[in-house]
Image: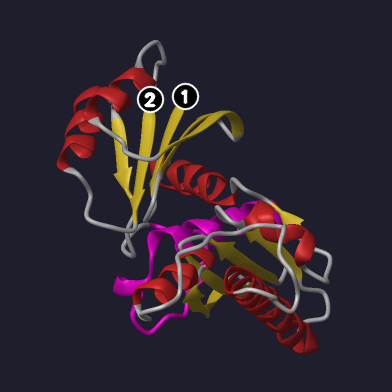
Amino acid sequence: MNLIVDIGNTSTKLAVYEGREKISVSRINDLSCEELEKELSGIKIKKAIISSVKKLPPFISDLLFAKIPFVHVLSHKSKLPFKIEYETPKTLGTDRIAAVAGAFSHFPGAQTLIIDAGTAITYDFFMSGTFKGGNISPGLTMRFKALNMLTDGLPLVSTSDNYSFPGRNTTDAIIAGVITGVTYEINEYIRTFKKKNTDLEIILTGGDGEYLKDKINFQITYMPDIVTDGLNYILEYNAI
């Protein structure tokens, strides 16, 4: 069994794979040592991989290295089955590396645009066995919080499907503005990439992916676990 530990900005995903088959996936908001031990109980884990976009809590690496024969901590120095054309690989988020690996494992040889709609929205482009780079934009929650924190009079609101357009009150104006802005942004990114890459495979993932997937005007593949799939692929590749 393989254990995948994907630590994001707001939550942690734990996944278990048997080879390339996904057995289970769980999301935990505040991962503790006790919670991790509970997740590991009753499962014989032979290999594990850790990906973290923030400072790794010591208890995670201490616990996994003590209990599991092979543990890999993903970084820009990890062995990868593709090239990275990024001028600052040290600053490249491991979640972005994993998403590209997941796309590569599912769509080998394809040109892919991976849109990860999480705390931030990332747009990563892959073609000819090479990660070409990508862009980073504020996610939905970040935009809502910015409007609230950086102004004196705007309330903090969240995503909803029940709002007027154009907004007839301040709450609706914020919701409509943020959601419409993100939707326009994603659609225009896809349109721009498709001008030069007509056979582009578009993958949508991330915590807000499910909310946004029906608002996109192009054919996409919604893959909520593309990052854990990619981490499992990288784990197997480094364990050889």
**Image point 15% across, 41% down: which residue?**
58
Q: Which mark is residue 1?
A: 1
Q: Which residues are magenta?
A: 79-107
Q: Which residue is mark 2?
A: 46
Say left or right for 86 vs 218. Answer: left
- Label 2 near label 1: C-beta < 8 Å? yes
Q: Position of residue 188 (x, y in %)?
A: 72, 84
Location of residue 42 with respect to 33 vertically, above or below: above
The answer to which of marks 1 and 2 sits earlier in the sequence is 1
Residue in front for this viewpoint, 107 or 25: 25
Element on which disc 1 rests: loop
Image-quadrant location for residue 68: top left
Location of residue 34 with respect to 127 vertically, above or below: above
Asked whether residue 39 is drawn in magenta, I would say no
Image-quadrant location for residue 148: bottom left
Asked whether residue 87 is drawn in magenta, I would say yes
**Image point 72% across, 87% down: which residue?**
192
Residue in front for this viewpoint, 97 or 136: 136
How packed mark 1 is, by other alpha carbons closer than 10 Å (few <14, some 14-19, many 20 or more), is some
Any part of residue 109 in sight: no
Q: Position of residue 46 (x, y in %)?
A: 38, 25
Q: Position of residue 175 (x, y in %)?
A: 61, 69
Determine the CA span between mark 1 and mark 2.
6 Å
**Image point 47% across, 80% down: which residue?**
85
**Image point 50% across, 42% down: which residue?**
232
Residue placed furthest toward the top: 42
Say left or right for 41 vs 227. Answer: left
The quarter of the picture where the C terminus appears is top left
Residue in front for this viewpoint, 159 or 218: 159
The amino acid sitting under disc 2 is Lys
The amino acid sitting under disc 1 is Met
Location of residue 104 with respect to 62 vertically, above or below: below
